[in-house]
Image: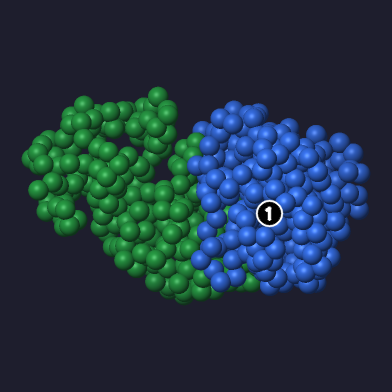
Chain colours: A blue, B green
């Protein structure tokens, strides 16, 4: 029986897992993220226990090089994280075992899991928006993960500052100009002195956050015309938020463009915390199929 | 010898043309746009002169239905233009002559012409941004025109108002919130009392316009990561503008993401006024190939 492997490579922890042909998880573990070589050494020791793994899906924190034509394809690119900049992540794995790998970003992994989930099976194009420590999007167009000169960093789109918001912004590059600078978890905590978990449901924070996410949804909609936008990540876990986003999105769009019904269009994640791992399994399977 | 037809269907005029197998234009004409049935009757009378036309590319003003699964595929959708709303444009043509058609938006037609042009032949993904009476974008990802629930209306992305700009905005839906509301030709003329053609090179209008187009380029870049953004349309014809856009784009991005060198990345159109017609020919050819 052939198995599939998953590496959900985050900046603070690595989740590793193995599934059978029915995508049933048969084993999993969590490692603390150290530097590149030290972490990958432990990853390969873990997977050595499963000689029947036929392919591995890797969803990695970024920025990473996804361009197969590039000489640094498979590398972690310039990052302040110690021991990771210019590390040949995929090359390390290939030297360990020469099997098919699907190499993509962490947010793409979760996006793919949402896309493959039953709740979204009728959908051809989908944007998965995660709002947590950072803000990012995985984009599927016509059944393929969108990628070009690099992978999307769609948390850094321009948005308009809410008139009630006087926060200076949290993005080290774009301050209060981009979505991540105004709407990430750390931006919320820095602005209000309370984390997204701590803010009560009727706090004005949620109306402002909803304005930003609705603006983002409008920009994604006008450019990509996806069939669905899926909201994930820690901040989106708060149930007070999405109904406010839907309301504000309808106000902002002002009937300009046809979209699916807003309750079917702006939706919460269908997968729980396993989204990243599931996405890796599905992607490992497709790497096996194309190999 | 088989011929190809082109219909560049604008709100004020229709350009019709016929080319040979080498894409050499052998005839062209221009019609004033009347209502749907009256205009299409004249279109078919024109093409009746060319019984050897094997396929036709149609690039139409919108909104139009591009979704082949939709019951109104090939229709002009809800538009204030008299005699066009819910008109079955493509159906009219198919009843006239049952040959392959490529049906798309006017901006997609021009985008495709730019993509197929020699200057962009090494490029896999491209965004063509037209700034004129309206603002719109045609987007090519991995060699295909991007489309989803509908076609992009990427002129209506959110941008931040320039602090020096006190104009109330020209978009009937989004006022001063979206790119089209702040940066279209009519917005410029309404704000300054002078058209884009009349504004002198050192007028502050250009610095503000450049800020808006640079913001748009940043949003397109972070979401799509295209290999190139091509600037077309009447406002972009002014040579003073693009160097200012490049400068402002670099400031706004602040080194956050890798892009091609800005002079190769943000470029003027390679095709002149024939872009729309050329795009129709290329698309007619691909309709013929897939038929």
Q: Is residue A183 above or below residue A266?
A: below
In depth, the one of B15 and B81 nearer the eye is B15
How far across and down, in percent of the image, does residue B72 sit? 39, 27
Q: Quadrant of residue A86?
A: bottom right
How far across and down, in percent of the image, does residue B133 sit? 39, 51
Q: Quadrant of residue B95?
A: top left
- Residue B127 seen in the figure: yes
Secondary-structure class at tag 1? strand
The residue under the point 27% across, 45% down is B289
- Residue B29 seen in the figure: no
- Total marks shown come to 1
The residue under the point 55% across, 45% down is A289
How far across and down, in percent of the image, does residue B99 sit? 21, 35
Q: Extreme top residue here?
A: B71
Q: Quadrant of residue A37?
A: bottom right
The residue under the point 61% across, 44% down is A285
How far across and down, in percent of the image, does residue A171 sit? 74, 62
Q: Is residue B237 left or right of residue A59?
A: left
The quarter of the picture where the N terminus of chain A appears is top right
The residue to which callout 1 is attached is A58
In depth, the one of B50 and A88 nearer the eye is A88
Q: Is residue B287 above or below residue A14?
A: above
The residue under the point 49% across, 50% down is B155
């Amino acid at each position: 029986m052939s198995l599939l492997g998953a590496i959900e490579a985050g900046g603070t922890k690595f989740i590793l897992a193995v599934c059978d042909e029915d995508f049933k998880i048969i084993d999993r573990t969590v490692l603390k993220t150290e530097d590149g070589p030290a972490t990958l050494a432990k990853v390969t020791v873990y997977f050595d226990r499963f000689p029947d793994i036929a392919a591995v899906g890797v969803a990695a924190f970024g920025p990473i090089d996804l361009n197969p034509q590039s000489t640094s394809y498979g590398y972690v690119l310039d990052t302040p994280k110690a021991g990771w900049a210019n590390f040949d992540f995929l090359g390390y794995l290939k030297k360990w075992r020469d099997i098919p790998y699907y190499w993509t970003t962490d947010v793409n992994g979760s996006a793919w899991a949402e896309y493959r989930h039953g709740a979204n099976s009728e959908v051809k194009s989908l944007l998965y928006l995660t709002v947590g420590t950072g803000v990012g999007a995985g984009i599927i167009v016509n059944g393929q993960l969108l990628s070009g000169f690099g992978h999307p960093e769609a948390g850094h789109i321009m948005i308009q500052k809410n008139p009630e918001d006087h926060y200076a912004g949290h993005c080290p590059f774009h301050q209060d100009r981009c979505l991540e600078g105004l709407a990430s978890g750390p931006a919320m905590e820095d602005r209000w002195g309370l984390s997204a978990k701590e803010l009560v449901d009727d706090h004005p924070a949620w109306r402002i956050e909803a304005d930003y996410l609705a603006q983002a949804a409008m920009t994604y909609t006008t450019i990509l015309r996806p069939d669905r936008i899926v909201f994930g990540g820690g901040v989106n876990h708060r149930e007070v938020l999405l109904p406010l986003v839907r309301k504000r999105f309808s106000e902002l769009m002002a009937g300009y463009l046809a979209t699916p019904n807003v309750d079917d269009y702006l939706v919460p994640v269908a997968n729980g915390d396993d989204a990243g791992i599931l996405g890796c399994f599905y992607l490992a399977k497709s790497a096996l199929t194309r190999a």
